[in-house]
Image (cartoon, rainbow, N blue to C red):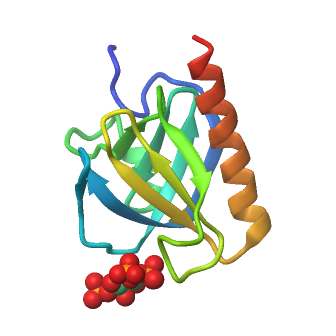
Amino acid sequence: PGDVAGADHPIVLKGEYLNKAKIADGGKKLRKNWTSTWVVLEVNQLLFYKESKQEALTGLKPGCKPESVDLCGAHIEWTADKSSRKNVLQITTSSGNEFLLQDDNYPTICKWHGAIKNTVDSLGKG
Ligand code: I3P
């Protein structure tokens, strides 16, 4: 019921481990801390799980929710100047949260960039 993260939205891209760093919260800059996270793309949001097995537990176990990123009104772009790493993309939400996603494998991160961009664009059309 309602908008329980991970419970009732169709999955667009199945889970995969990517490197993630949240660099701003509500427009306020955060200290960068890269972590490996299990990323799932749904039709309206991106979910960050600590590990793959957490996805299966969400909905069964209270308090086992992923971090969710509302993609409505969000922006996604490649960035070369926010990190010394290669293959970095940035997602900025309408609430001013900023996330970097990165993978050393270019085809992998391209696939995520394309799918997230399609999702953002489709939500934008309303
Ligand atoms: C940061 C850490 C990050 C690095 C960041 C550093 O140092 O080395 O990996 O980002 O660079 O500040 P600390 O652990 O002391 O916070 P990248 O790996 O993305 O380059 P930055 O300050 O240029 O963002």
Position of 14 compared to 45: left or right? Answer: right
Q: Ligand 1 appears in which quadrant?
A: bottom left
Position of 6 compared to 15: left or right? Answer: left
Q: How many marks?
A: 0
Q: Residue furthest front?
A: 81
Identified at 47% across, 61% down, the residue is 100
Position of 60 compared to 99: left or right? Answer: left
Q: Quadrant of the N terminus?
A: top left
User: Which one is in front, 34 or 58?
Assistant: 34
Vertical side of 41 occupied by 121: above or below: above
Identified at 20% across, 43% down, the residue is 63
Q: Residue furthest top?
A: 126
Residue 62 appears in which quarter of the rendering? top left
Q: Quadrant of the C terminus?
A: top right
Residue 7 drawn at (x, y percent)? 42, 28
Vertical side of 91 occupied by 19: above or below: below
Vertical side of 87 occupied by 90: above or below: above
Residue 110 appears in which quarter of the rendering? bottom right
User: Which one is in front, 50 or 30?
Assistant: 30
Residue 59 drawn at (x, y percent)? 34, 34
Identified at 35% across, 20% down, the residue is 3
Identified at 74% across, 53% down, the residue is 111
Residue 70 drawn at (x, y percent)? 41, 33
Residue 114 drawn at (x, y percent)? 73, 45
Residue 35 appears in which quarter of the rendering? bottom left
